[in-house]
Structures are given as structure tokens and as C-alpha cells.
Amino acid sequence: MTQQAVAPAHIASESVLVAAVRQWIERANSRFDLAVPVPQVRMDLRGRSAGLTVYARRHRQRALIRFNASLCARYPAEMLNETVPHEVAHVVTAWRHGSRVKPHGPEWRAVMQCLGKAATVCHRMDAPASRAMRYFPYRCRCDEPRYLSTIRHRRIARGAAYLCRRCGSRLVATDGDSVISPDRI
Ligand SMILES: [Zn+2]
Ligand SMILES: [Zn+2]
């Protein structure tokens, strides 16, 4: 099976990650003859971890995968080709065996092998630099959230207005999590 090439320029968007997660889940489903639902995806992870799977409270319900937005922006290829299948393999392992088995034990490694991926546990991506900035989620008429720097976020809190450069509508703060990134996002 060929892997779809994804343009790095589009990686920061959640929709690309969601598509990649779906692709790997469908691959695992067909190889293991399962019906694992596509997990929820969030880009709210900070610090050193590239991804984190949050298992559903009840066995065989929809899981959640959290990704590190900062690492997504800086290491798009690694995130799509390594982190996504790594986390999807956790979801599939939990579906087959429950979430009590060792996270990177033989059950998980078997799924990774079946997906054609090396069962590596640590990533080689650098954690965000110390001068990383915090960005706050805003909404406009576009589908995806916009992120504004702390400076702009504070100006808006004091009454300033910013328009989305793409759709032209006014940006409104959402109650989503802020993210830390060394790059403008
Ligand atoms: Zn893991
Ligand atoms: Zn917009």
C-alpha cells in the first residue's frame, strides 16, 4: 500500500492530521478485520511528547488522540509518518486487548509490524525552544481555528479588533486550549 504524500505546508491544520489518523485506522481495520471508529483528534499537547492516546472510558468506544501542535508545525513528515501510526496502534491495541496491556508491549508491536512501521518508542524531534510563544485559538468564518499571539490576544482583550486575512470576518476568541510554538501559527 502506498503512503499518501502530504504537503508539509498544510501540516499545521488539524484536518490533515484527522485525515492521516483515518487513513491508518482504515488500514488497521482492513488488516485485522476490525471496525475501530476513527478517534477524535486534538492538537493541544505541549512539551516533549509528540502524541498521546486517551482511551475511551468504556472499552471499545471512541478514543482521543492528542498531538503536539508545535512539533506538527516543525516536523510535519515525522508527525504524519511516525507519530500518527504510533498513536493509532495504541488505539487499535486497546480495541483488541483492552487498555491494561503494556503500552509498548508485544500486542502494540504486533500492530505496528502489521502496519509496516518500526516499533520505535522515542521520537527524535526537539522539544520547543525556550523562546516559544503562546498562541490563543480564535474563530472566524473559516473552518479551522486561527491562532493569535499573546500580544494580539491582549490587545483584543483591551478592545482591539482583528480580521481574518482569509475570510475577512472578525476573529472571536474561543475557549479552546492555547498552544505553545516557536513558529508563527
Ligand atoms: Zn506510545
Ligand atoms: Zn477566516
Image: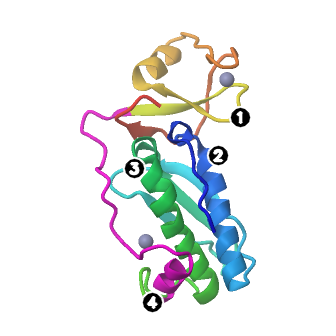
Residue 106 has which mark? 4
Q: Give the SS element for disc 2.
A: helix
Residue 117 has which mark? none
Q: CA distance from mark 4 to mark 1?
A: 40 Å
Residue 67 visible within the image: yes
Ligand 1 has an atom within 8 Å of the beta carbon of the residue at disc 4? no
Vertical position of residue 107 compared to residue 47: above or below: below
**Residue 27 percent across, percent down from the top left:** 66, 71
Amino acid carrying mark 2 in the image:
Ser
Q: CA distance from mark 2 to mark 1?
A: 10 Å
Which label lies toward us, 1 or 3? Answer: 1
* Residue extending farthest top: 160
Q: Mark 4–mark 2 contact, CB under 8 Å?
A: no
Camera-side residue of 125 and 130: 125
Comes first in the chain, label 3 or label 2: 2
Local crowd size for mark 3, using a 10 Å CA cut-off: few (<14), some (14–19), many (≥20): many
Q: CA distance from mark 1 to mark 3?
A: 23 Å
Magenta span covers which residues? Answer: 106-133
Residue 143 has which mark? 1
Residue linked to disc 2: 15
Q: How many marks?
A: 4
Amino acid carrying mark 1 in the image:
Asp
Q: CA distance from mark 4 to mark 2?
A: 31 Å
Q: Quadrant of residue 141?
A: top right
Comes first in the chain, label 4 or label 1: 4
Residue 46 has which mark? 3
Which label lies toward us, 2 or 1? Answer: 2
**Residue 138 percent across, percent down from the top left:** 59, 29
